[in-house]
Amino acid sequence: MSCQRMLALVLLVFLLLNIVENEAASFPFSCPTLSGVCRKLCLPTEMFFGPLGCGKGFLCCVSHFL
C-alpha cells in the first residue's frame, strides 16, 4: 500500500508542476484553436473568449466563430 501511495504522490506532484508551468495545457481549447488573436482589448466586432492561452494581460478575440 505504501508503494501505491508514493506513486500517486509522485504523479500528483508531476501533474501540478506541469499545470503551473503551462496553465493552458490543462484546457482543451486555446486562442489559435478558435482562430482567435491575443490582444489587450478586443475590437467591437470581435467576440471575447477570456485569456485562453494568451499571455498575462491579453484576451482571446475571435472575429468569427465556426
Image (spheres, rainbow, N blue to C red):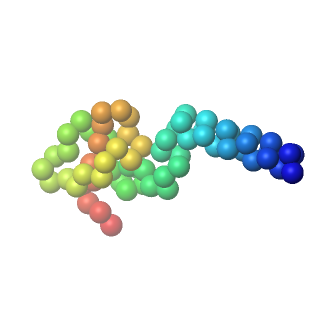
Relative to residue 9, is residue 24 drawn left or right? left
Q: Residue at x 26, y 60 (%)?
A: 64
The number of numbered badges drawn on the structure is 0
Q: Position of residue 16 (x, y in %)?
A: 60, 40
Q: Is residue 21 in view from this perspective? A: yes
Asked which quadrant contains residue 12, the reply is: top right
Q: Position of residue 53 (x, y in %)?
A: 42, 43
Q: Residue at x 75, y 47 (%)?
A: 8
Q: Position of residue 27 (x, y in %)?
A: 48, 52
Q: Residue at x 64, y 43 (%)?
A: 15
Task: Please tell me which residue lies in front, 13 or 63.
Answer: 13
Q: Residue at x 61, y 36 (%)?
A: 17
- Quarter the C terminus occupies: bottom left
Q: What is the residue that sits farthest to the front in this orientation?
A: 1
Q: Position of residue 18 (x, y in %)?
A: 60, 39
Relative to residue 31, is residue 63 drawn left or right? left
Q: What is the residue that sits farthest to the bottom in this orientation?
A: 66
Relative to residue 12, is residue 2 drawn left or right? right
Q: Is residue 37 in view from this perspective? A: no
